[in-house]
Amino acid sequence: MTSAKSTWIDDLRNNARMQFETLEYPNFRYGLTIRMDYSDLKTEHLEKLKDQSNIEFKNTDGINILPLKKALHSHNNILQQHLTKLMPEQHKFAQLHRMLFECMVIHVPKNKTLGKPLIINRNGGIHHLFIIAESPITIIETRESCNSKNKSRSLQSLVSNATEIIVKNNATVNFISIQKYDNSTFHFDYKNALTEPNTAMNWIDFCLGSAFTHSTIASTLQGQGSSSDIKTIFFGDKEQRFDVGAHIIHAAPHTHGNIATKGVLNDKSKNIYRGLIKIKQNAPSSMGYQKEDVLMLSIDAEADSIPQLEIDNNDVKCSHAATTTHVDDERLFYLMARGLNKKSATKMFVQGFLNPFIEQITDEKIVEEIKEHIAERLE
């Protein structure tokens, strides 16, 4: 006999299937001239895609981690209220995710002091994390391809990940994600958070791999005095494409939001940045800021920035900025005059550009892995 707790999950999946069959494939077009192409993704029979995800957890002391089926018994109400609700509705790939996802629920109970970050390794498939944080926690997530030797672009290369976080009263969540999929992977990623009063949601997102990535990080500041900081770092070479979004919605008074994006593009790689600070009418005394800086290492690379401000309250402070620059010839000359060749000087320049974000990670091993990964790709 089907329980009431599982019926709403079935309804969610069935509704997603109907939406998936109705919705057209997105064209990722923004305005008249800005477009991200993913036409080399094989879209035949996507609805038959099976989950191939693998997930591992480390440093789990004091944290409850449950598969969805078990979590429905202990957290049914909050799951029914929020699960996949923060993801976009009119998006074919988001509905595909709702149809097929496997979900793990992470609950950080009240009054817990965690000595180490929770480490999550997840690879491939269509996977969902739903996190309920009632105490402060730092989470470091790594994503790599199951088979790094697979270079053919096939149906099995589609990866869809989603992370939803409910930040409860007075908690702080730091979520650090490092994505290093191989160049056969088409990656769709949805990160969303909802904050209660006096909380903080901080994201650091490293987008380094994949052939194509469509990713959005969104924080909805629903509690008074809550804040969110979104830092995104991308590094592209060859023909990589990154369609990256960062959104902060101010829906309560005295909320603070900050978006900072840094990227490096080489060869024929391309990036589109979609930034949004939205301050609603019921959010006076709020502050929002966004900035994107892109460093171009090739004249064939392409970067487009689409920063947006939507402000419905006069009692706020809000601004945005975007810059696109090439490696400074004078600085390269300065470094080369001190014995470095051009390649080594360029590496040092790129490292100096990205290090302020990279070194915010407290795990020294992960910091070194990221630096080595970028250095290898500059060879």
Image (tube, rainbow, N blue to C red):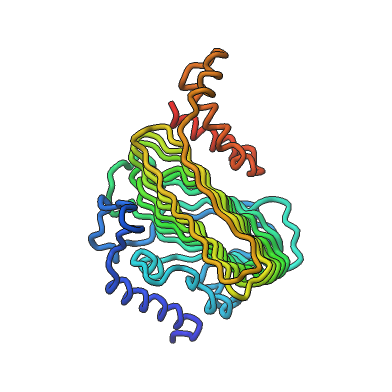
Q: Residue at x 67, y 71 (%)?
A: 253
Q: Is residue 67 above or below residue 368?
A: below
**Residue at image coords 49%, 30%:** 375
Residue 316 relative to residue 17: left or right? right
Residue 365 spot, x, y in % from top left? 61, 37
| Rendered-image quadrant of the N terminus | bottom left
List x then y, in percent, for residue 304. Answer: 40, 48
Residue 346 x/y as whole percent: 49, 26
Q: Residue at x 48, y 71 (%)?
A: 84
Q: Residue furthest front?
A: 314
Q: Between residue 145 and residue 328, name the one nearer to us.
A: 328
Which quarter of the rendering shows the C terminus?
top left
Q: Image check: 286 left or right of 2?
A: right
Instruction: Evaluate whether residue 177 shows in this view.
Output: no
Name the spot of residue 235 as percent of width and height, x first.
Answer: 46, 40
Residue 151: name its quadrant. Answer: top left
Q: Nearer the viewer, residue 181 or 239?
A: 239
Left or right position of 364 against 97? right
Q: Residue at x 43, y 36 (%)?
A: 296
Residue 6 visible from this viewpoint: yes
Q: Residue furthest left?
A: 44
| Front-lying residue, 151 or 361 | 361
Marks counted in the figure total 0
75 relative to 130, above or below: below
Task: In the rendered view, tell whether residue 338 sits above or below residue 58.
Answer: above
